[in-house]
Amino acid sequence: MSKRKSKNSWIYTLLVIALVGIYLLAGPDQFFIQDQPVFSPPTQEVKGITATVATEKTWYEVYFTSPKIPFDEVITGGIENNLIDKINAAQISIDLAVYEFDLENVALALIAADNRGVLVRVVYDNEFSDPDPQMQELKQAGIQTIPDERSAFMHNKFFVFDNRCVWTGSFNLSLNAAYRNNENALYFCSTEAAQNYTTEFEEMFAGQFGVTSPSDTPFPNFTIGEFAIESYFAPEDEVMNQVVSEVLSSNTSIHFMAFSFTNDPLGEAMRSMLEQGIDISGIFETRGADSQYSECLPLLKSGADITLDGNPRTFHHKVIVIDGQTVILGSFNFSASADEENDENLLIIHDPALAQVYEQEFQRMKAQSLLPVNGTCKTK
């Protein structure tokens, strides 16, 4: 053997020994992909988005939009990029229920998923999505799409990935939602949750919208680790009764962010808790807050800490944080139409850490909100 070959063989031997040593020190989990979702680093802020994402101690990813005010023309770095990551990672199936859809990059990601063999299916509200070219692009690509053509809305905004992970919240697939509105989205993996949302999707895919949709959620109550989660769909599950019941169970505080809050029983429940000394604090979307149907003025007159959002566009959250321990979220506005007519989804999650993530967003939005003037629900 030549000296060059002998020297090379020693180098190869040393490299093998080094790699084996690293493997033993780091453990096999660093070298092989596990059957778990791959999450990003902890809380981070990037252009257009505030992200609180899962670590080894949590089970969720949470995203809040951070629109620049005054607005600029920057339309990169928004929530939809995180959603596209999930679309690109899907291997088997993607079911989505969408209300608004004008994000071209999401449409292209869905078409690419379909092209690589992922089963992509869509239900959507025809009034808000049919006029946009993105839905037509999906149809032209051969993706299965089912419209809701009723006067009531298919108001969901959820995805189910590979029958195991769910994306839901207030976030529509629109440029306004990504870069102009205040929105939230929650992503997590749970076979029970995925079955719940898939069951709802299958009903709508078969044309069972609104009141024709049966109440047959497989796991209305399930757990992730030690945390209890309640899963509801409107109109079939009497969702507002569930929300009111949760509000009436409060011991210390009820903090809410509301795009639309016109439901009298929920308003009455909050005023009842206010009389019992519970801290009631809320932020209303300014548009419509002063209407005769809004619960803004009755709560304000009762002594609740009520402010109006400071975003010239849309404050689109539908969130209630109770006692800093439980969070209520989804597509479900606090209105009769959401409860009785529209297709909606709502989660009640009993996880103090997650509730605190939403509480922090509430406090961030509260600091940006505006005081009502002259005993009205107007800002000027």
Image (cartoon, rainbow, N blue to C red):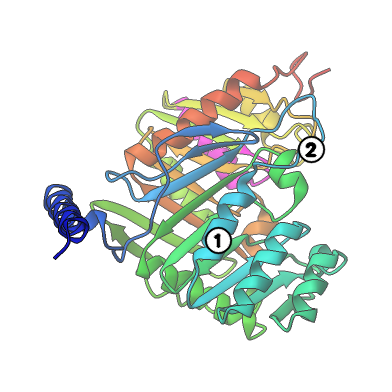
Which quadrant: the N terminus? bottom left
Which residue is label 1 attached to? 345
* Location of residue 245 with respect to 179 vertically, above or below: below
Residue 177 in view (yes/no): yes
Q: Nearer the viewer, residue 304 or 345?
A: 345
Please provide percent x and percent y for residue 58.
Answer: 32, 45
- Tell me, yes or no, whether the two marked residues, 2 and 1, touch with CB atoms within 8 Å: no
In primary-sequence order, the first of circles 2 and 1 is 2
Q: Residue at x 61, y 69 (%)?
A: 96
The boundaries of the magenta stretch are: 258-275
The Cα–Cα distance between marks 2 and 1, rounded to whole angstroms, is: 23 Å
**Does residue 88 appear left or right of residue 313 in this picture?**
left
Residue 238 in view (yes/no): no
**Does residue 220 appear left or right of residue 130 in this picture?**
left
Q: Nearer the viewer, residue 132 or 215?
A: 132
263 within the magenta span: yes
Please provide percent x and percent y for residue 289.
Answer: 75, 34
Please provide percent x and percent y for residue 297.
Answer: 70, 28
* Location of residue 347 with respect to 319 vertically, above or below: below
Q: Nearer the viewer, residue 35 or 144?
A: 35
